[in-house]
Image: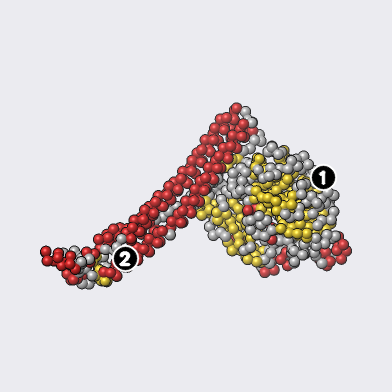
Amino acid sequence: IREITELYISQRIDSSLLCCHFFSVADLYCSACECALCEDCLPAHEDHPKVALSQALEQHRSRLQERLGAVQNRLPQISDALSLVSEILQQLNNQRASIEEDIQSSFEDLHKQLDVRKSVLLMELEVTYGLKQKVLQAQIDNLTRGDGDITATCTQTEEALAEEASVATLEVEHELEERLKELAILRMPCQPEENDQLDLVMETDGLRKSIHNLGTIVTTSAVASQSEAMGTGLEQCIVGHPASVTIVTRDKSGGACKTGNAILSAEVFTPDGSIVDGEILDHKNGTYEFVYTVPKEGNFSLALRLYDQHIKGSPFKLTVTKASEVSPSTTTRRGKSPGQKKKGSKRASSALGTPRRKTQNPIEDDLIFKIGTKGRNKGEFTNLQGVAASSSGRILIADSNNQCVQIFSNEGEFKSRFGVRGRSPGQLQRPTGVAVHPSGDIIIADYDNKWVSIFTCEGKFKAKLGSGRLMGPKGVSVDQNGHVIVVDNKACTVFIFQLTGKLIAKFGSRGNGDKQFAGPHFAAVNKNNEIIVTDFHNHSVKVFTTEGELVLKFGSNGEGNGQFNAPTGVAVDVNGNIIVADWGNSRIQVFDGSGSFLSYINTSADPLYGPQGLALTSDGHVVVADSGNHCFKVYRYLQ
């Protein structure tokens, strides 16, 4: 023994090459038994596959390094999920605080007998919040534990890999490999399992009769990762013809949601930006319908989002074709497609019916300037919508997808912008309409937040109105009494509020009748204090008294003078003439106060593409949001 020991010491035999036989040198590795072999071991492993021990150690290290890399690659995914779920939880907390404030303020003006119902509502809020908070917090705890386990195991593995490979460390490394295998396939809840929605529906009409059931905490358990869409409108549609898509909302387990009120958004866009808005109909049973119309052929994308996250399969590839390319059995052709003519160009005399019509268009190619490109910086836009002009020489643009309002001088010089994305009071989620109150306050319709926000002329938040009443406000205007006119696109209703938030009147419902709307967009007020509303899907313009009585209706679907393909923006000049943005026909038409066609603004030098809001500036020009071209344009206007 002494001699062998001395030989070992003198020759410095590496102990990592020893096997179970005393002081025998191992230079082979049995792949079947996963152990080192010396010459004495060979008979017992005669039929087993064997490789050089050094090669086995190298292969094992390589596999271990590969496993380590695969598991480490999961850390950014978990970190992103943790950040997303934490943000939703924070927004849920903000919504809870906001609704609690709404509940408190709503009940302050009521009699003491409402205290019992207030307590019930606050309790319901706490229970609903608690259920949602529990789901989100449990998900955060799981993600945190998973993050900790992976980090700890990866650290141990890295430490093992830093040591010299040896038979003595094989057992530890085997254990680490098995642990890494488990972590690599460990299921982690990386998709949000709840949402941050907490809404309050508060109706005070007939309060004395319904005090017992006053107020409801509204929410759903819908999550984007499980919700899905279906329908032919996901893949193809026809130029100028409405297409529809059905969205089915589901909870974290894939179960169908049975109630509505989820916050959905949808848009059709080309690679260069958003160009088409549509209407989302809530069937109140967990399903929704998105109806849209595309003004030209081509390849588009359709994005469907639930709580700002894409649903399954979104965005979808959409092909838009001419009606002539589809068999007659699938569609009814309604006039000439907008894609078959130059957008916004002046029609030839033959298209007008008689050459005499040519003299009815005195406004010739009067583009003064345009401002904007696609982007998120100052003077850049992404899906600009509403336009307003102040008496102080300012142009205000509701930059919908950038969640802000940008302000320019009448000459197009950038002045300022304000707006922070969010769902709390003072934040903007999808500003679509903007108006200036005689007091100087800026009024903004927020489609996704379902309320109207009021800011000072410097952009400081003052108040909100319509919360709990509005479903999807699109356009906003101010009448001669200083009342706020709100066009609710989703509810197909016009609301009239005092600046304090008190509801004065409302009128309209969904349909194609004289006093009904189908996706109304914007409104203007004439010198008689009458309200002029563009009825998008009914292809008409309607004029009402403040009591909701119809005074005038004009327009029909088509491309001729006085016809519309989905009208959007509207304004009135000092003579009572009505200026209308004809969205689907990409043009601007001018009518007298009785609805008779007068002229159109020639835009052939730089054609419009899907114009939205428009207004008259203080120096008498027409400013229009050219949504498809990501800019606004100012034209000379002859009154």
- Is disc 1 surrounded by few (<14), some (14 to 19) or many (20+) residues within 10 Å? few
- Give x and y (percent) for residue 323: 69, 66
Is residue 138 at all visible to an observer of this figure? yes
Is residue 256 at all visible to an observer of this figure? no
Sequence order check: which comes first, mark 2 or mark 1?
2
Q: Residue drawn 55% across and 39% down?
A: 97
Q: Residue drawn 65% across and 59% down?
A: 374
- Give x and y (percent) for residue 636: 81, 57
Q: Amino acid at mark 1?
A: Lys
- Give x and y (percent) for residue 226: 51, 54
Q: Of the numbered discs in the image, which one, if any, rests on residue 60?
A: 2
Q: Quick one: 557 or 1, which is closer to the camera?
A: 1
Q: Quarter of the image for the N terminus: give it.
A: bottom left
Q: Residue drawn 23% across and 70% down?
A: 27
Q: Quick one: 81 or 340, which is closer to the camera?
A: 81
Image check: 152 left or right of 557?
left
Q: Residue drawn 52% across and 51% down?
A: 223
Image check: 84 left or right of 505?
left
Q: Amino acid at mark 2?
A: His
444 lies above or below 119? below
Residue at disc 2, secondary structure: helix
Tell me the distance, in whole angstroms, between the alpha carbons under discs 2 and 1: 85 Å
The residue tagged 1 is 527
Image check: 227 left or right of 530?
left
